[in-house]
Amino acid sequence: MQTQLTEILKIKFPIIQAPMFLVSNTDMVIEAMKSGIAGCIPALNYRTLPELRNAIKELKEAKVEGGSFGFNLIVNKSNVRYKDQLQVLCEEGCDFIITSLGNPEETIREAHAVGIKVFCDVTDLHFAKKVEKLGADAIIAVNNEAGGHRGNLSPKEIILLLKEHVSIPIISAGGVGCKADIEEMLGYGAEGVSVGSPFIASKEAGVTQEYKQACVDYGAKDIVVTERISGTPCTVINTPYVQKIGTKSPWIERVLNKNKKLKKWVKMLRFYIGMKATEKAALKATYKTVWVAGPSIQYTTEILPTAKIIDKLTT
């Protein structure tokens, strides 16, 4: 399992523990590093900049040889804290940043100035070429089996397409729940994988036991795509509440989204409302349950320590 990703991040296995809103935390990432992979946390998991700064310091102190850590940045206007978060990451230092949902040019420039690698989420060839031109160190190829915000192409389709047209390393995101899946992605030409949903049901994850148990009880057939979280397709577990409210955006949003002047503000409001709903469901039991997950929960059969989950993926 030695690849370009293991060389770039100095890790034992070509795996990134994917950044997951509310789920990822320092305990998970520390266990990931101890097990020889990279861990990543959304910067938005921290409400304040001092909390983000303290998390970076904790991870730096806990870092071991063969492990690596990074943070995910939402780089579009929906994240009003983006510039401040980037500044903190560059001041304190981390091994890598994963950018999502926007133009990564500033992040690449600022991060590279202090020696931080930048990997960029993409869902198609158009944006892959763009971020390569901007100087990204690798591409996170988000496929149609990813948990949360997903792409439209299958893992094989997007890896082969990007492999043919870009020269920087490709990290496959989505559809990995066991070692055979990792070997399959590497066989297509990926240099590593980003794995998220299997870690929701980890002992270290910062969400409710109900959320974790749902990832055990439900499977791939129970994953549906909804527009009700951020206005763009997002995979969730098809709970009774999701079935009740449906997966399409409310009609008023669909109408307002056709107005060029209002579209940006409608999307920002939907993103905020959706994140609050997700937070409520993840952190306390509620009948209004919207649990984000991908089809790779098919392989989740019990709640385990992070180290055990990584052992299942690598042995």
Image: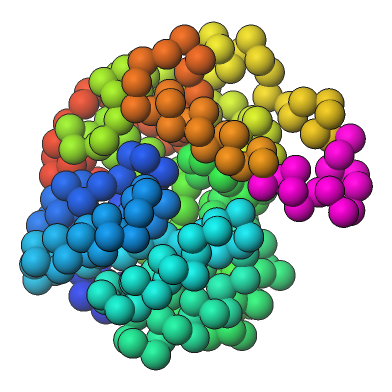
Residue drawn at 61 percent across, 85 percent down: 133
Report the predominant secondary structure element of the magenta stretch: helix
Relative image position of residue 96 (x, y in whole percent): 34, 72
Describe residue 149's horizontal placement relative to residue 308 as left or right: right
Relative image position of residue 77 (x, y in whole percent): 63, 60
Q: Quadrant of residue 111?
A: bottom left
Q: Quadrant of the N terminus?
A: bottom left
Q: Is residue 214 above or below residue 308?
A: above
Residue drawn at 37 percent across, 49 percent down: 47
Q: Is residue 27 magenta?
A: no
Furthest residue toward bottom = 113
Residue drawn at 52 percent across, 37 percent down: 275
Q: Is residue 192 above or below residue 165?
A: above
Q: Quadrant of residue 280?
A: top left
| Bounds of the magenta segment | 255-268
Q: Is residue 267 magenta?
A: yes
Describe residue 297's horizontal placement relative to residue 255 as left or right: left
Q: Is residue 289 above or below residue 30?
A: above
* Count of residue discs: 0
Q: Is residue 164 above or below residue 115?
A: above
Describe residue 57's horizontal placement relative to residue 143 as left or right: left
Residue drawn at 61 percent across, 62 percent down: 76
Q: Does the image show residue 250?
A: yes
